[in-house]
Amino acid sequence: MSSLGRVTATVLVMFGIYTMFAGAQGPAREPDLPGYFQYSPAQLVAYEQSLRPNMNQLKQAATRLHDAGTSQAWVAHREADGLAEIHEQWTDFMYVISGEATLLLGGEVVGAYTDSPGEIRGSGVRGGVTRVIRQGDVVNVPAGMQHRFLVRDGQQITFFTMKIARAQ
């Protein structure tokens, strides 16, 4: 198995263990393992092609794979810069399936507005730090931290996100 395959398998096992121990009541993939789900590296890579035709005006698309109440699994694809985002109640734990982007973290959201309860968006960011993320990287963006994806022209990024509810 390639090192990418081993990393993917390790990350997916971690997500499966988390959802089982978090008391997830999501749809069972196997009758004897409620809340368990598993996606192969090939299945995750296939999402890049399936999401591309469904991109919005910001050249991004996402699909939810699993909802366990206190956690959700998503796959997202981007081909352009995203809006600045703050998820007040959700940590984004991400695994980059393919591509590359710059993640802008921290700073102050410019033109901040509430998109939905607990979800802040904005047109840009003042300050902050940047981190390049690419295929195989695992990234944790804690609840309440501003973040924004910056994708160079002609580039793309596809990533798996486990959204984990902030402990109350």
Image (cartoon, rainbow, N blue to C red):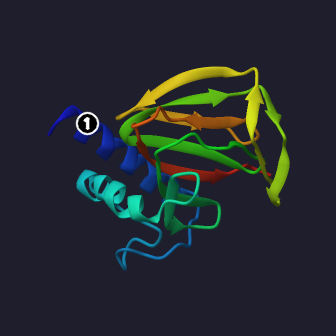
Query: In the depicted view, which residue is nearer to us: 114 or 10?
Result: 114
Residue under label 1, please give it: 4
**Rendered residue at 28%/59% (across/down):** 43
Q: Residues within 10 Å of mark 1 (few under 14, many from 20)?
A: some
SS for callout 1: helix
**Relative depth, front residue between 129 and 93:** 129
Question: Residue 71 at x, y = what percent?
Answer: 59, 59
Of all residues, the one furthest to the bottom in this rendering is 31
User: Is 146 positioned to the left or the right of 104 in the image?
Assistant: right
Looking at the rendered image, the quarter that the N terminus falls into is: top left
Residue 57 position by quadrant: bottom right
Residue 160 location (% of width, % of height): 45, 50
Q: Position of residue 35 (x, y in %)?
A: 47, 69
Q: Position of residue 41 (x, y in %)?
A: 27, 51
Position of residue 128 relative to residue 23, above or below, is: above
Q: Residue at x 22, y 32 (%)?
A: 3
Query: Could you say which is closer to the camera, residue 82 or residue 6?
Result: 82
Residue at left 45%, top 35%?
153
Q: Is residue 66 left or right of residue 121?
A: left
Amino acid under disc 1: Leu
Query: Residue 92 or 151: which is nearer the viewer?
Result: 151
Image label count: 1
- Looking at the image, residue 4 lies above or below residue 160: above
